[in-house]
Image (cartoon, rainbow, N blue to C red):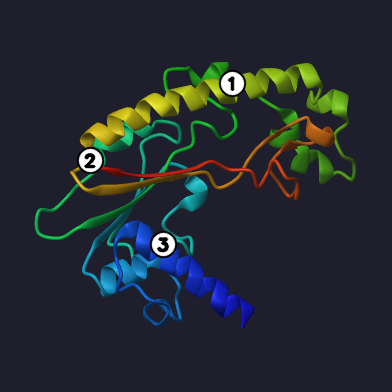
Amino acid sequence: MFASTYYKQELASLAGRLGIPEMGFVDMVPRLWLPDFLKNRLGYHTRAIVSMPVLNGHTPLNVDFDSWQLAPQHNDLRAMIPMLEFSDERPTFYLLNTGETHYPYATPDEPENEWPVIHGVHGVFKKAGGGSMLTEAEAGFNQDRLDKLRARQIETVRWVDQAVEDLIDSLPENTWLTIISDHGELFGEDGFFGHGPIHHPKVIEVPMVEGLVR
């Protein structure tokens, strides 16, 4: 009962934000999946451009999308803009995924050979397979290194912020835009780095910005 009531409230809030009053709880059951509702109930084009290979077209997320494309690079939101297609006859829903702010926190103008390498990320499974874990010294997980990585992520946020301006300029009028992250990131808080598998407040602390492009 609690879950049903909560879902109804969330869907009513979403319908209000999107200006789709006919999007009710019964219409979404049993899938509770926005692309399904938009495509099969309202006739939207549903398209996705994803930059992170972990979200490739074989993942369960690729359901009820007319097209699902992998971006040229994992860290270049601007490269997706020319790939956008809009129709005058039907509205379009787009899912865009960009990875500049994900490890290794690199903008597309930085050569790959200059990206940071954290051996705890790249080599921990190989080392663990031999029965031992990397030590902090081996992995390079000291606070000075983590502070530099945090600074890199902040710089990529600035990059994405500017790219979003270009994205907004390319969108049709009356486009509803939602910007959100899938997780936060730890840079030494309570001795952790990264985002999983750690249930830490910083990992679930994500930005969310919504607005209408007029």
- Mark 1: which secondary structure? helix
Amino acid under disc 2? Leu
Residue occupying image coordinates x 25% and y 41%: 83
Foreground residue, 53 or 65?
Answer: 65
Give x and y (percent) for residue 47: 30, 55
Q: Which residue is mark 1?
A: 152
- Mark 3: which secondary structure? helix
Q: Quadrant of residue 149?
A: top right
Q: Which residue is mark 3?
A: 14
Residue 107 visible (yes or no):
no
* Discs 3/1, front: 3
- Mark 2: which secondary structure? loop
Q: Quadrant of residue 195?
A: top right
Residue 129 lies left or right of residue 175; in this view the side is: right
In primary-sequence order, the first of circles 1 and 2 is 1
Q: Which residue is mark 2?
A: 171
In primary-sequence order, the first of circles 2 and 3 is 3
Amino acid under disc 1? Arg
Residue 120 lies left or right of residue 10; in this view the side is: right
Give x and y (percent) for residue 37: 33, 71
Q: Residues within 10 Å of mark 3 (few under 14, many from 20)?
A: some
